[in-house]
Image (cartoon, rainbow, N blue to C red):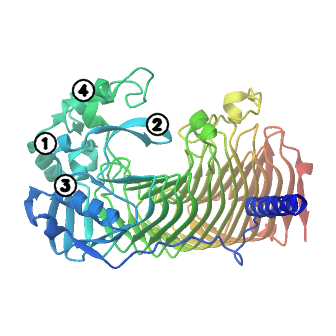
Amino acid sequence: MLIIRRLLIATWLLITWSFLASAQTTSYSWQHLPIIGHTSFKKDTFNIIKYGAKADGITLNTININKAIADCSNKGGGVVLVPQGLWLTGPIVMRSNVNLYVSRAALLQFTNDKTQYPLVEGNYEGHAAVRNQSPISGSDLNNIAITGEGIIDGHGEAWRAIGKDRLTENEWNALVATGGIVSQNGNAWYPSQSYLNGLSTPDAGIIKPGKKLADYQSMKDFFRPNMVVFTNCKKVLLQDVTFQNSPAWCLHTLICEDLTLKGVHVRNPWNAQNGDGIDVESCKNVLIEGSTFETGDDGICIKSGRDEEGRKRGKPTENVIVRNDVVYRAHGGFVIGSEMSGGARNIFVSDCTFIGTDVGLRFKTTRGRGGVVENIYIKNINMRNIVTDAILFDMYYMGKSPGEAETGGTETIPPVTEATPQFRDFYVDNVVCIGAEKGLQVRGLPEMNIKDIYLSNLILKTNKGADIIEGSNINLKNVYFDCKDTSPLINIANSNNISFDHVAYSNAQLLFSVSGKKTTQIKVSHTDTSKAVEATSFKSGADSNSFIKTN
């Protein structure tokens, strides 16, 4: 009997180990996408009117709505109904097994009375930080949703500072008339002295040992909350709702699993300070589908913590599907970084449109972040009127990479450490961009090149063509450039194993500019270089033998 028991235990352990090992090594592809778990709710409905809520736009319904949510959860879950009307409220705290349903004719309006939002220990831009309580929040929950076709408004204009140059004269005069503080030079408006206190304090929101929340009270207004924050939650659904006018980021999911965003509309003014659409941070199994983003910062953004704090957390954002989404006038359409210290992997982006964004596909990091971003698959992307780069890989975020003229080719290269970020294994296919300053920008680090990038079937009608700096194994296949500034069309600096296969172009004064002593193995095939006024030039120590042209 003892032998049989031991055999059963050993068999169970073997099966468990095999399952865990398989889960950790799952290989995803377009044919084998990640699977996202779904929410499920009882049909029991809890109307907030029955809890004393009033839709007069004056009565503060915070207690009533939270009571309905708590009652719903305590009774096994169901739907909390926000019916037609304008409902003024303070912070709402979600509970497990609750679907907060906002009817189409309902406006859930968060109050601009900042005293209703107590200071809490939260998280912002990858760091643990002091924040005001978010308008909607939830931690350690299971099976939650916000659905319906109504509107949730964060009253962000009461929280955000703004520059005079980002408003019309009438808008500026109207804003100043509401109160607040105008800067001494007259170029900026701040909501309050409390906001200015935080602005003038270095690392104002960082939680320091020995400090209590009360110690930050004089700077309270500076700690603008993200509008919706879910932390360590499983099975989360956001569907059909309009989320708008957030004080800082609009939607922030942190360390969540099985997250679905479907048919959502995120709206922030174009000049909204830090007005990101959605920031998915250290989450696993995510679907963002059929949604529209009009934001003041990045549209759809993948993050995983910042610097040492993010590396210690060690949770990548992984197994993500982004499809059939539209992004208007954001800093970036689809973005990874810059806070990506925990890594990002197994991300699939398809059938999206970006219109008027600063950058289309934006991948950003910097020294000190660490983290590995890998296995990123992107296809069927349309872009129009992109302000800067259609496709950007940048490891000098918020900084400037030194050029040959500044360093004389003798730049001191830092050692590779755990704080060195890595971008590798990106596959981008079928991208059309009509209108941008530059088609492609790759800017790696000398100590850690951006590597193993595969770009195919691109049409880039832009002012400038491509820059590839400190890249390794960068591959362009079936790419068409229609550019105005073509001196050069393609610039390659200190890069190796760069492949151009079936590259076409409308015109080129100089087709390839090759520079840097480290540049080797530039391979060009099935490309007519004779159309260019000048095919190649070599400078700053580049060897002409590094350029290999075949039929």
Residue beneath label 3, please?
62
Q: Is residue 226 left or right of residue 481?
A: left
Taking the spot 83% from the left edge, 63% from the top edge, the residue there is: 8
Q: In what quadrant of the picture does the C terminus appear?
A: bottom right
The residue tagged with tag 4: helix, strand or loop? helix
Closer to the N terminus: mark 2 or mark 4? 2
In terms of secondary structure, where does tag 1 sit?
Answer: helix
Give the residue type that dot 1 points to: Val
Specify which label sits upstream in the sequence, 4 or 3.
Answer: 3
Residue drawn at (36%, 59%), measured in percent from left and top? 95
| Residue hosting label 1 | 176
Q: Is residue 349 above or below residue 141?
A: below
Q: Quadrant of the N terminus?
A: bottom right
Q: Nearer the viewer, mark 1 or mark 4?
A: 4
Q: Label 4 crowding class (10 Å Cα cut-off): few <14, some 14-19, many 20+?
A: some
Mark 2: which amino acid? Ala
**In the depicted structure, whether residue 435 falls above or below residue 269:** below
Q: What residue type is labelled 4?
A: Ser
| Mark 4 or 3, closer to the camera | 3
- In the drawing, does residue 92 fall left or right of residue 501? left
